[in-house]
Amino acid sequence: MKQKNKIFLILCAAVLFTATGCKKILEEQPRASIDPSYFKTPEGIQGGIAGIYSSFRGHWGTQIFTQLFSAGTDESLKGAAADVQHWFTYNNPLIKSTTNDYAGFWNGLFIDINTANGVLEYGANANMPAATKTQILAQAKFLRAFCYFYLVTTFGEVPLHTTFNTDPSTADSRAPLADVYAQIITDLTEAAADLPNTPAAGTGKPAYKATALYLLAKTYLWRAWSSAALPTDFTSAYTTARSVIDNKATYGLNLMPYFGDTFKEGNEYGPEVLMVIDHTKDLKFGQNSAPGSFASGPAENKSNFFWRPNYPTVNANYPSGGGASVCVRDIRNGRPFQRIRPNTKYIIDVAFANRATDSRFDGTFQTVFLSNSTQMAAVGSPGATTPRGQLINAVDTAIWFADRVVTPAERAAFKGIIFEPDHLPGATVKYTASYFPNLRKFNDSTRADLNDYSDRPFILFRFSDLYLIAAEAAFKGGATMQDAADMINVLRTRAALKLNQSPAEYAAAVIAQQITPAQITLDFLLDERSRELFAEDCRWWDLSRTKTLVARVQLHNSEGAAGVQPYNMLRPIPQQQIDLVTEGPAFPQNPGY
Amino acid sequence: MKKTANITKRLLQLLVLFQLLLTAGQALAQNLTIKGRVLKDDGQPAQSASVLLKGTNTGTTTNQNGEFTLSAPSNGTLIISTVDFITQEVAVNGSATMSVTLVSATRSLGEVVVVGYGTQRKRDVTGSTITVKGETLNQIKAPNLFNQLQGRAAGVDIVNNSSQIGAGGEIRIRGNRSITGNNNPLIVVDGMAFGGSVNDINPENIATVDILKDASATAIFGSRGSNGVIIITTKHGRTGKPVTTYNGYVGISSAIDTWEQFNGQEYAKYKEDARQGQPAFLTNPNVTSPYALTAIEQTNLAAGVNTNWQDLLLTTGIRTGHDLNVAGGNDRTQYFFGFGYFRETGIIPDQALDRYTLNVNIDHKMTERIRIGFTSFNTMIYQKRLGTSAYGTAMRIGPLYKPYNDDGTLNFQPTIQQGVDNTTINPLTSIGNNDIIKANSRRYQFQHNFFAEVKILKDLKFKSTFGFGWSQTFNSNYTGPNNVFNSNANTAGANLSQSNAEGWQYTINNSLDYNRTFAGKHKVQVLALQEVQKNKFQSQQFNGQGVPADYIQDYNFQLVNTVTPQASGYSESGLIGYMGRVTYSFDDKYLLTTTVRTDGSSVLAKGNQWVTYPAVSLGWNMEKERFMEGLKFVNSLKLRAGLGISSNAGIGPYTTLGSLSSGFYNYGQGSTPLVNYVNGYTINTLPNPNLTWEKTRGFNIGLDFAVLNSRLSGSIEYYDTKTTDILLSKSLPRSNGANSILDNVGVTASKGIELTLSSVNIKSKSSGGFTWRTDFTGFFNREKIVSLQQGLQQDLGNGWFVGHPITTIYDVRKIGIWQTSEATQAAVYGAAPGDIKLEDVDKNNSIGASDRQIIGDFQPDFVAGMTQHFEYKNFDMNIVMFGRFGQTVVATYLSADGGANGYPFFLNSRVNIHKVDYWTPTNPTNAFPQPDASRDGLLYTSTLTYQDGSFIKIRTIDLGYNLPNRILEKAKIQGLRVYVSAQNPFILWSPLVKAGLGIDPEGNGTGNAVNSTAGGSPVQTRAITVNMGVPPTRQFIFGINLKF
């Protein structure tokens, strides 16, 4: 080959190679991430709904959320290892500086709202069967209303956006309460019209018609108590709640015969459940960390941890030192986070004072831990030895959180350790911030590892709340006092049923449980809500709605009494939101914070 | 530690004394007859060189052997000169014999600098560049270039970001320009953009490193070079007899120190103090602590048990490197083969990094007009258990538990009685157990470049280069049951994961180069270039749990009980560039370089993809001017100035499109896809098709000088840059429905001064005499945000403040600890004695978001490095020092933010912590607050973490000995040097270490700091964090350099 040719060839090859590559080199196609235009596709629209449901896992059943909203009520005190203590003690100077505690909840709900807006906007024109589209749009409306319901009841006036926003703005302002409530009611009314009477078989309990009506009744009730109230609101709340109760068969709803079964493992999709935040053992769709990895995932349901006493540190000689643990930590007994504890003075003396004919104390609290000297010890194997004898694993009670003061004779005859309510005079071995009755409702014994999260769906709304809503609405003028009593008596009759009860005992209990209209006061209704819904993430909202927060905390909660203020009936706006509004008028904080 | 510091101080004092003695008066003396020999620097005799007695006309010339004889006073000075060599003055100093080696003038003044797509003589360079020789870098026996470059190049700031073996560090050239975009410099190896990581480059193969700093120098590289360019030239073959080189060293590696924690007695007291620190203690002195000493701890305390878990986990590591090179060639073909092996084992048992490198390059002249070449870099890296350590567990476990049972077996669950932590497994189970603990990583990377060059005309060359780089990283992890990393009791709970990442990059460039000198004085060089680059990356990861048997590990995913796919990565991006450069010089005196480059990038949206930017720079070699003739002591003096614009599209691909967050959901317990198992999405980042290039306008002025027979040389530079259209990932108020958007907002500016000095402090008159050279680099950079979006002075949510650096700390300020006498005052703030006392900025008797203020930033006031080089006879010695001054670091372990960013359970007594001086009613300190067992995290502890991170460190001390030629000649060896070296021997000065709050202030992490109780993250990005983990290491090394 001649040298000239060589040169020519090299030149040609080089330039050709470069030129052919050029055309496509500046094109972009993502392949491992999804961009917002995906919402225009049918799968994207369905994905938006699932994305919103999935995001709720980041709140209900998680550590900080549970403490934030269980703290500072008449029902609870801070546990020994509480993280957000200032809300338990109403240390308002500290509350003021930690308003970002709510950033996760606030941010998440607003992202969900815009996602729902995107689904509604693109979904209207999506190419999919009309019936499917109707369902999806109804879900989107329900979810948008759901988010606004929690925002308005937590923070008061909030920004109101009902169109899909893709235009970045750092300006925003709060909409009047009336507008926010009106939007929620519109969305729920429209959602209820289109949602199915029961969820599709095998799909658990996402929102369906009764769920929308339940939230609608509750919204009416909230607005009725608020400064944006319409005169008809209590009536609307009552009739909406009654419409579900009276048609319970249509919606596949009913009260479970025995109260203790409502939260039993496996009953999460039962007839009493209106909506769950779903969880599964599947690591991917349940967004779970691998079993045995200390429950590190932010979307995991850890409600089984927070109300659990530090039982493994109870040693055989307690309250003296020394001796082995009478009950070691294992799968059955769970992970003792001791973040929150029941306010036992209120629980034992007030709300659950009647433990004789009302099964709800036993249905809510676990007062005994069986001996367990090694993890998952075999039944009948020898356990720890206390000064009163050797415990038999899984047979003898190692720890008993008594609901009263025991006699010295009883104590001497009992091999395990007996704790007594710390507020009762004469108590010797007292409940502490570490040792208190455990909450039974979230127990999960089917986990793979003792440190694991719970794979149980989180029960968010229950049918029994509709009776309480109806009763409260009736009591406030939405119906008669007799109606109120009737509603309450349904629940109280159910609560009369206990395990191992003779028919005669049951019959007597039913009679004892009945109340008359004259007995109903607001405090009675709130006590009844405790009995029925203890620790179900609604107490602070109930006290806030009924404007009884200050009075009830002062009356019942020794930790919070000194600090609680009327402005605590709204939670502070996250500082991050205030900081990030950099254009237009500054974003106002709630008064007091 | 103290001892070594003292010795050094003494040593430095001696050196100063020595220098003083030298400048002292010289004794009068009689005439001597001097016999001398003059050699050229290539070892050949310098014939006919002029030898003149200074201040006289007496003189002679050398003979053909380079020898001369001259009578001169014993205190006289001889001036030796010849064409093309630098004139040297040599003091007689009473010696009758002398040997002088002349340095080639073309080598010193005509030294070649790589400037990007070509080379220039150093004297012709007009931009701001810095050159570091391979042998200088390799004085530091470190795994990678970044470790070696610390403190060696002015304006190049490298911060450690991990204490792991082989961690590269974070490098910034002249500070941050971009706020959220990419700030990493471009690495070019042998002319081609390098797609691998810095660890893929074997430092032993580096011949020189040239760093381009200012816009006029980097313009040629376009957008990729906007953060500076590091050009690595590797060793190449050369004409001549083949030379074989072996460089090898072996050394031991150990922790520089261990963290100071509470010992047994102190720990027990700490627990009791934390019990008394509970608010409930005030009303109930018998209140129990949830973290009281367990029965085992009480027994062990009485028995005097005091376990130091850190010592039990640490071991001695090995660092060794072996490089064998062969280079040679004739006038047509030159070749180079290099094989390298590097191994370092951790100071934590079972950690190891092995790197094998093979470099080959061949240059061949096919005809008089055509030259072709091939370069190949191949790197294989195996990592074992890097980053896997039980150190964190060990530091928490407490000194009152025993590591071993009385029968000598491992105490499997030492804290079994400790309620909340009773399942903690002994951290010593992390040692060995290779069958159940596997964390392997294997990386293979190659870069192959081919070029062909055609001489079209005498002065016109066409060159085409194709470079292809490919890398693959495979991670393979298995953690079986029953060890500190996995508390599961059987293989059903074994965890495993595999990930694979693969990337490639090709670059093609075609250039025309015209190079001609007109009329002897007008030198013109024109370069036109076309370039295309494409990058692709993809990665996958699968996790799994449960295998039938430990030996299955991650080898068969079909046998794994549950497999969970993880998020994958994928990106593709392309770049097209056209560039032209003209350099012109007149009489070697006046220099001009102009560059224009146009870039198109795929990461921006259509319509905004292209950008064009110019750069111009001027140089003036002043020593050539007539007015300089009187200033004989000036050997060279050059003034340079440049102005240029560079652009950065340093954002990831697809960011203009916005993104959705993905989640997953199950409707019910079924598993039917789309019915039960559904993928979910929520809005995350909004699309922004208007995103455009970030532009930096930079001005640079520099002065290069050499004076006093070039014994003192250096340069000083000043620069001033301004970056507009900054790419910001802007956090949005979520009430608008999105998390963030990437946007062009704001302006930043930075300016700085850089100083490089080389001084020959003592130069022996004869070869083999004492020589002392000092190299110094010092620089500072001041960056600040000039403006944000319209009129905004501060963006609190994003942590940006006009007038302040990009990395700012914004938090409440600790002013002390509330003392007992201040109880009433403290109560106003919801605090009690023992709590942190904060500055109430708005004086509203409440601490809140409005009390946050700018506490500091992570920009050091000054960074400096100094190398001392000594030679005497066949000995040589180097001492390299590195310092950073006025720098804030975040010591994360001095805080508890309730999350993993701080130190969980700091000051609540649940676990052991760094030993701090905490408050108690009887110890009214203002240092740290009172421990409180009743809460997981004390409040406002983020304010405890901001510490002075200034330091001066000795990076290396090495002592070498060149074996005499007469011994070597017999063995046919050209050269043999043996040396001993201490790497990171000690920290000379550090306020953090002195205060007992840490062992190394340099930082081993970057990223977000702890959250503040007062709202938000006080540091949004790029905090320099000091984390309490495996300690940094020091090495003692023995090595040889052999040439034959």
Image (tube, rainbow, N blue to C red):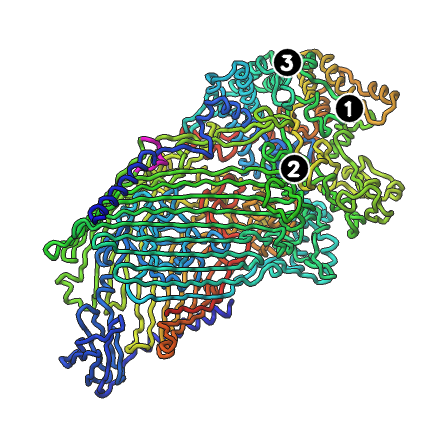
Task: Give the residue type at disc 2.
Answer: Tyr
Q: Is residue B218 magenta?
A: no
The stretch of residues the image draws in magenta is: B600-606
Say whether disc 3 or disc 1 marks the residue closer to the N-terminus.
Answer: 3
Q: Where is residue B792 in the image (x, y as percent from the top left)?
A: 37, 35
Image height of A421 relative to A464, above or below? below
Q: Name the residue under label 2.
A: A453
Secondary structure beneath dot 3 equals: helix
Q: Main secondary structure of the magenta part?
A: loop
Label 1: few (<14), some (14–19) or many (≥20) C-alpha neighbours in 10 Å: some
Image height of B580 relative to B957, above or below? above
Which numbered disc covers residue A258? 1
Task: Give the residue type at disc 3.
Answer: Thr
Viewer-proximal residue among A279 and B735? A279
Q: Position of residue A103 (x, y in %)?
A: 53, 34
Query: How far is the residue under mark 2 from the one under mark 1?
Result: 27 Å
Q: Position of residue B327 (x, y in %)?
A: 34, 63
Choose mark 3 or mark 1, whichever is in front. 1
